[in-house]
Amino acid sequence: MRRALQVVPALWSVLAALVVSVILLALAGAPPFRALGLVLDGAVGDGGRMADTLMSWVPLTLAAAGLVVTFVAGLWNIGVEGQVIAGAIGATWAARTIPGEGFVVIPAALAAGVAAGALWALAAGVLKTRGGVNEIFGGLGLGFVAQSLATYLIIGPWKRAGIASTSGTEPFREEVWLPTVGGTRLSPVAVILALAAIAVVWALLRGTRFGLRLKAVGANPASARLLGVPTEATILRAFALGGGMAGLAGAVLATGIQHKLVPAIAGGRGFLAILVVLLAAYRIVWVAPIALFFAILSVGSAQLQLRLDLDSSIGGVLQGILVLFVILIGGWQALHRRDAEEP
Amino acid sequence: MEATIASIVAAAAPLVFAAVGETITEKAGVVNLSLDGSIALSAMAAFAVAFLTGSVVLGFAVGALLSALVAVLVAFSGIRLRLNQVAVGFVLTLFLAALAQFLGNPFVRQPGPSVRPMAVPVLSDLPFVGKILFDQNVSVYASLVLIVVVAWVFRRTRIGLELASVGERPEAAHARGISVSRYRFGAAAVGGALVGIAGAAFSLDVKLGWSDTQVMGFGWIALAIVIFGGWRPIWVALGCYLFGALQVLALKLQPVFPGVAQILPSLPFPLMIFTLVVVNSDRLQRLGERFPFLGRLLVSDAPAALGTNFEI
Amino acid sequence: MLELRGITKRFGPVVANDGIDLDVPPGSLHAVLGENGAGKSTLMKILSGFLPPDAGRIRLDGHEVPTGSPRAALRAGIGMLHQDPLVCLPFTALDNFILGREGKIDRAAARGELREVCARFDFDIDPDARARSLSVGERQQLEIARLLSLGVKVLILDEPTSGISSEQRTKLFSALRTLAGEGLIVLFVSHKLEEVEELCDTVTVIRAGRVVGERALPCPADELVELMFGDLVVSSARPPVEIGAPALRVSGLAAGTGRQAVTGVDLEVRAGEVVGLAGLEGSGQRTLLRVLAGLEPARAGHVEIDGRSLDGSSYEGFVAAGVHYLPAGRLEEGLVPGLTIAEHLTLAARLSDWVVDWDAARSRAEEAIEHFRIKGGPDTPADALSGGNQQRLLLAMMPEDLRVLLMEHPTRGLDIESADYVWTRLLARRDSGTAIVFSSADLDELVGYADRVVVFFSGKVLADLPAAELTADRLGTLIGGKVAS
């Protein structure tokens, strides 16, 4: 698939996705270009909106950076959504139970998120290497388990005083919120974490033996084994690392955006991160810009709801159709190349 | 008691369509992972069509057609384009769910037409089973008939045997003159149509009306149940009813144990994982070899060529 | 009368069948003989419609048989038993028997038919048993019964005797004789001389995708060997090697299952000795090499390197003891597609450094490229290299100090220049005291480079002879399973 996702199909796909969305918008009775303008305005129109977009970009980028690690190792970590939730649960636990100042509790909460996400991913990894359960189904199942665990905690042990409601836990103490700047929701710490995640994965894949082993296991486990790569350990480490980053995304969602645990804490961001990585063809340098584009679409689409009374899901439609077209057009072109080669 | 069981049978009907449909598709070796999005799109489209035309039947037809097209697209991308079926299905899941939400916006929570209850005369007066099986609506009857028909097709007909061979060992099917790609496209289309009917049954029968949140997750549940049922139609259907029972149980427990009630509906997923671990466990495989009957009951492998692309 | 005309089939650059003509009269037990990769299986798959040919025509009893359609071939009366019988493992024997028939399913009638065919040929198949639980021989019998019940006039059997018991073989041969007596055409594909001589009346020999000869049987074995393997260059005298202490000692080794099994292997290889493993593909050489590399467990027996037991040791343990394995599938098992030459050499260095110094790695790669004359740069991906250069890269990845070097088909698919080069490097290793064990299907290579040749047949060592006493003819006969007088 890597070869299929080259520049030319990407260009065609962007064009095709644009055409389809214009048609869809017209069908929905909206002036298409005004709608697209509104999306842009809604995402980057002023400082506050830019802050919101960046804060939507952070968890998406964190989860996607972790996914690059697992995808490079040949692992379809669809369980990433559950790992984000697990991270949020871990962070919530720390925020609720650890007393003290913010500079103590916040790092602890983030670390708890990383640990919980890594553990959740390791479960999928062990199921794969020891239980023979494909990571797609194992991860998916564990994702739903994490989801109901969150819901259970919210209305059970962590319910708000007096009422059990799915609207979320009691908000954290304000010291435990990720500090923001300029009266917006922008948290510099979160942005730095996301950039750091990109840098770490980039460095890992480019300059380390572990990164080399990941690639080897992903491209050909049999050869990798002969070359002395401990395949099982490498797979488990990839899961732990990818899950840890997804867990960090969950921790940021809990401590920096929601300031509490809500049932829809991940809100499909893990799944969206898979689209980002597919579109980036597993290349880490493309993750940040594509995630930013997706964040703009997601945040900006909310404007359509307010201004044109359109459903905000147009962002998801655009994201989906873009990735779908890149994959299908890439496959189509590969088919024609093959047909040309085979007389 | 009868009323509870009857309500489970009714509530599980859409899931039966989806899970049995996916069983057909996977039996032929094609994985259609797009279920969650397909169901949403078909539920929305079926309701919109029925709402606009007043015809419930037309709604079902459009729902079936749309999901069949989606499934054929998944099969095409695997068979012709040699793409990863899982990747395409996954992307479609997210895309179609968003598309359904977007296009369905004007229809959200509108009252509209629905499938009407229709008791079968005489039979519905039978004790116990009458209430459960014969005092329902057409869509529920269809789900019951479907289970029987699909089980019969796989056990007794040439089409069923050939379809299973295509998913099990496509080379063997090809060597016997069976067209692998024709069966795969066919199974994708039929299975997809049933998934679409599942969507339509959600919005026109069980949940009445369209809202994107009410169908979310059922596609994944259906996929899990296919594995849980070991790709055997009757077991898959039983899995659907088990899930329906869990939902009812959750409702009843809601006032007493709200926490537990929230968790119950996700039970199919750990059960699916457990099933997969058990199926892959060497010890159980050996037990199955020693006691063939027990083995056949417990262990049912995935179609051996599931998700692979066959080429000469 | 079965007539094939101009059957041609290419797979990429490889021509598997090159304008093959074949005529077989009814009632023949006709053998199609040739070494591995000669193109026999491809030809039979085309005849049975399983594969479409690029060119060529098939006629049976004067009627044109459409090519590329198994159904058309079956309707015309051509059926094939594939080397690995194509049955669906979770299905019952009866369902496999029925599968592919046209019209409605009638299990009761089919059960009767299956019983009838089984009774006639003394086959023993439980119709209700799952195919998974049947042995290879029983699966074959099931397939033959199915094809006969479909009324085939041409029965193709592709290497039917590997993996079946001798009792099943006897039954199979007697069934085939009966069928030929009734006017069927039996096409028996094999590379085993002995069986061909035992069973068949006529033989067509195929080499490198072409028909190289037709003979009536019986016919002198060495004539067939020459047809199969072509002109053999008998080895030239080689300089005597200094052979040291035993480096590798194997005793009573058993490993693998089914077709891949080996049993009762005893082998001693001394430092500086080169031992060639001969035999048809799948006679056990690959399993032995993989066990010796620590990649597969042994069921019984012992493996020692330099007198130290490695029983139950992990792959890492074998590597630490100085064993290195070069598999046949260079890009499938040896190299990682997508990774560059520099990345391969870095992985192969098995260092425990965390951060890779790519500048140093690249200059090491450049040295290796020059030293091993690899056509490529440090950043060339392994899958972009030619076969010869891939093999050179694999050689470059070998550790310095080796006690035992295990190789599968060291020069398969290489041009002469690359093959010579590979052997130059290998012999240099031998001279520095490494014991070399290699498998090959190339008789010239075996006789030319090995000091001793061990011949495998059906998972057992058939002969262990000094290469000097061996002619290629003799070796060819041995490979066919015949211990000549």
Image: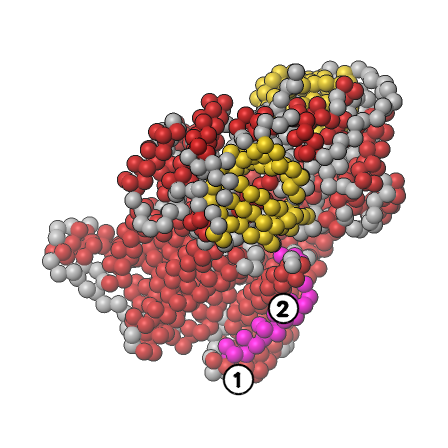
Is B308 placed left or right of B24 in the picture?
right
Count the labels in the image. Answer: 2
Q: Main secondary structure of the magenta part?
A: helix
Q: Is residue A19 magenta?
A: yes
Q: Which residues are magenta?
A: A1-25
Residue for badge 1: A31
In-image side of C122 versus C51 (left or right): left
Callout 1: chain: A
- Which mark, residue C271? none
Q: Around disc 2, counting alpha carbons within 10 Å, would you say few (fewer than 14), some (14 to 19), or many (20 or more)?
A: some
* Residue C381 rendering spot, x and y as whole percentages: 75, 50
State whether residue C327 is above or below residue B195.
above
First in sequence, mark 2 or 1: give its number: 1
Name the secondary structure under disc 1.
loop
On the image, the x and y values in percent for residue C71 come to 45, 50
Residue lying at 32% horizontally and 64% vertically, measured from the top left: B201
- Identify which residue, C123 or A68, lies in the foreground: C123
C436 vs C2: above or below = above
Residue in the image at 71% along x and 26% along y: C473
Give the residue at mark 2.
A293
Please name the residue shown 45% across and 61% down the image: B71
Disc 2 marks a residue whose amino acid type is: Phe
Q: Is residue C23 left or right of residue C11?
A: left
- Amino acid at circle 1: Pro
Residue C94 forms part of the magenta stretch:
no
Q: CA distance from mark 2 to mark 1?
A: 22 Å
Give x and y (percent) for residue B239.
34, 48
Q: Dot 2 falls on which chain?
A: A
